[in-house]
Amino acid sequence: MPVDTNHSEQEDSLIKKLIKESLDDFKVTNEKAYEILISHVNEGFFESRQTPKPLRDLANQLVGTISGDDDFDEN
Amino acid sequence: MKIKNVELSWFRGSAQHAILETHSKSVVIYGPNASGKSTFPDAFEYLFKNGKIHHLSHEYSGRKQEKGVRNTHAGENNSELVFTFEGDKKASILINEDGTNVFTFEPETFKDMINSCKANQIILRQDEISNFVNSNKGEKYSALLPLLGLSELETAIENFSNLKELLLEESQFQEIEHRYTGLMEEASKIIPSFDEGQIQKSINDIGKRYLAIFPKDHSEVIEKLSLAIEEKIKKVNSEVKRYTILKQIDDENLTKKLNDLIKNQEQSSHDIDSLLGRKLDVLERSSEFSKCLGEEDRILCPSCGQEIERAKYIRYVESELKHLNKVKEIYQKAKNSRRSFSDSIKQVIQKTDDEDISKWLELVTQKELNASFKKISEQKIDETQESFTQEKLNIIKPNIVIINDIIKKEIEKTLPAVEALLIDKEAVNIIKKIPEIEALGKKMKGIKSIIDVFDQAETSIHEELKNKTQFIINQISKDIMGMWSKLHPGEPIEDIHLNIPDSTDEAIDICLKFHGVDQSSPRLTLSEGYRNSLGLCIFLTLAKISGKLDQPILLDDIITSQDREHRSFVADLLLTDFSCRQILLFTHEREWFSELTYRLPHSNWIFLKLKPWEKPEIGLQWIGSFSDFDEALSLLSTDVTSAGNKARGIMDTNLSIIADKLKITLTYIRGDKNDHRGAVEFLEHITSEVEKGKRFRKKTENSDSYEEYSEPINDWKTTISLLIPWANRASHGGYVTNAEVEKLIEMCRKSLDYFKCSDCGEFAWISNQESRKRLQCCCGKLQWRYD
């Protein structure tokens, strides 16, 4: 799914700007997580109250971006 | 976004069809208690809250509030709500029997506008005011936050907080951390640090001991090393077992026990021989002696025959006894030594029966040791035997020495090899686990970095929320105080402001100065009426500054606890501060409704009345004309005295309002009587003022000049003359005819109509209410001078 990370800052609400600023560190350290979170921010995910299901889905997507699983096979 | 009309079917109190036509004007709707007027605020809340009504959020209303939102007699009919706004924008809702609903918008984009409306900024109900003011500071914060437009920030914080917890749960962070810590603890004992050089050095060191050739590939080295150590461990397993048994044999300390035995046995043997000799001698002589022993101080020794002191003899006997006991002790010791030695021998012989040991002993290299064990075994050493013969000892002793020496040497030889092997095994295991440790560490770092970012986002949003809340509440505090001053002019309650307490930033207090003393809550000193008034000020302030001035405001029974004077100020406030907004005001207070009909300009406001609600199948019913006199006339055929009484009531209420508006000065009467002045008294004073001249003026036809408006005087006097006999009679149950009451109603209506402009339809006091000299209707045709 294409991710809209080029959302214009001018269109952003204050809350979106705040969250995006906080995510800046991710641009380099975890690009995949950055993209996932930015697309959620652009959709206004964080401004509306979320039930556990979509939050859990997002948590799982983020877990998938963390390296470690790929490098080590517990078996 | 002005409302043009609302059509309801089978929703709450409405039956087949109920329509509220506003024509985009503000509306005052009067309805007695339970007439169903709150059906309209409920309908708007249902629209703005996407199918939910707050006061119906309870266990009895059903999952989709279907038991509350639908008329109880709707049957199979669907409930329907249709809202038409200016510009012919429409929002329709169909509610099915099971409470499921379908929202339709025309145009579709109108949905966004409706969704942007916050019900809490649009609809205010009486119970909400008192609930808010009486709530605690945390609840006030929660209630105000959405109204301050900051709830999105709070929601984002909550989402991040929940997401953090779920991320930790889904990533199994706790389990990973636990395993990582365990492995690290284990590893740190073997490998001082995890840098590549150190690991390589450890591998090389261990490799040298087990591998002849080092493969090039790192993982192949680990694999080979691991196999080599495993192989060795298999071999070593029997060695370890043997080592353990030999160690146990060594721990039996056979040499020492044998030496103790020999020493104790020698001593015991020597003493017992001597004792036996002595004992015989003593026994013989004592026997002789006993025959001749007299009372003398000196006696003859039975042993040597010489004269000795009696006491000395006794001491001698005692000494012998002591010696005998000592021997007894030595004898016991020797016995114990024998037991201990024979026990140990028994244990050792038993251990040599172990398969691994016996096989090992069979080896040529262990011939000497094996022979020694056999010789010892052949001696049949038993703890019960009285003593070991010298001959036996001569066999045992050299063999024990042999056993001791060989075993000690064997242990020394085995110990470092086994220990080193075990350490190497552990080291290789840890080296094998390094990729896992690194992966776990990497994963932990990855999770922590996301959590850190969430923390950062949460903190910055929280900081923003705090600053914004502070900024907004500082601003609105001024407006609240401004509104309060309008509702309570000249009263000693000042400096009303919202405050975030120092102790927490998720709370809001309402602070004020009461007669100069600071109060941290209105609940400390303000009456219920004043507290509600304060709540109204806060709501109206928030509604006013919401920035969406085109949104309507619905006020449902908001002045219940206000007295007449303060209600009047509420009307002033609506006129001065909300003239641009469409207001839908619902009240069950007939007197206030009447006042509003005289106070609010009919060009911007319409006034509607609901009939008392009869039954679900009929639902809401409007009274056709707003005029109370029509209602009075409708009573004529059935209850003539009630009709007359009603006409009088209308005049009492309305003339008191008119006199107040026209600033008619009345003489002061003591106590409550001021509040019980009747229509006759008001009309007499108004007539008298008009008769004085220059008070009531009307613009002349085709000219801008004014002339005295004395035409009403005669009709007012006639009305007074009818009110005194007929209205009084009707009020006190006396006899009045239909014709009399009909005439009374007609004159009363006519008398009041004189105050309304025939051109613009507004009352003579609607404009220039702030003027210090005169009031006038909207077009200025009708004027009342009071200077």
Image: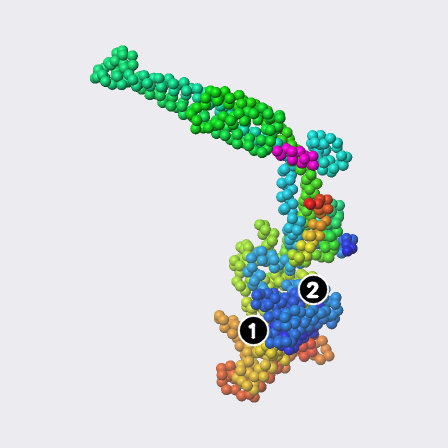
Q: Is residue B314 rendered to the left or right of residue B68?
A: left
Where does the image place residue B682, in percent across and percent down from the top left? 56, 76
Tell me, yes or no, if residue B752 can be seen here: no
Would residue B726 be counted in the magenta stretch? Answer: no
What residue is shown at x 67% (from left), y 35% (from top)?
A: B231
What segment carries the magenta color? B226-238
Which residue is identified by label 1?
A: B33
Q: Nearer the viewer, residue B679 or B441?
A: B441
Residue type marked 2: Asn
Q: Is residue B678 rendered to the left or right of residue B176?
A: left
In the image, residue B629 above or below residue B469: below
Instruction: Determine whether the residue tagged by mark 1 lies in a helix, strand or loop.
Output: loop
What coloring was used for the rendering? rainbow
Dot 2 and dot 1 residues touching (CB under 8 Å) = no
Q: Nearer the viewer, residue B251 or B344?
A: B344
If the image is split into quadrants, where does the N terminus of chain B sit? bottom right
Which labelled disc corresponds to residue A72? none
User: What is the chain letter for disc 2?
Assistant: B
Tell me which numbered mark, 2 or 1, is placed earlier along the sequence: 1
Image quadrant assignment for residue B410:
top right
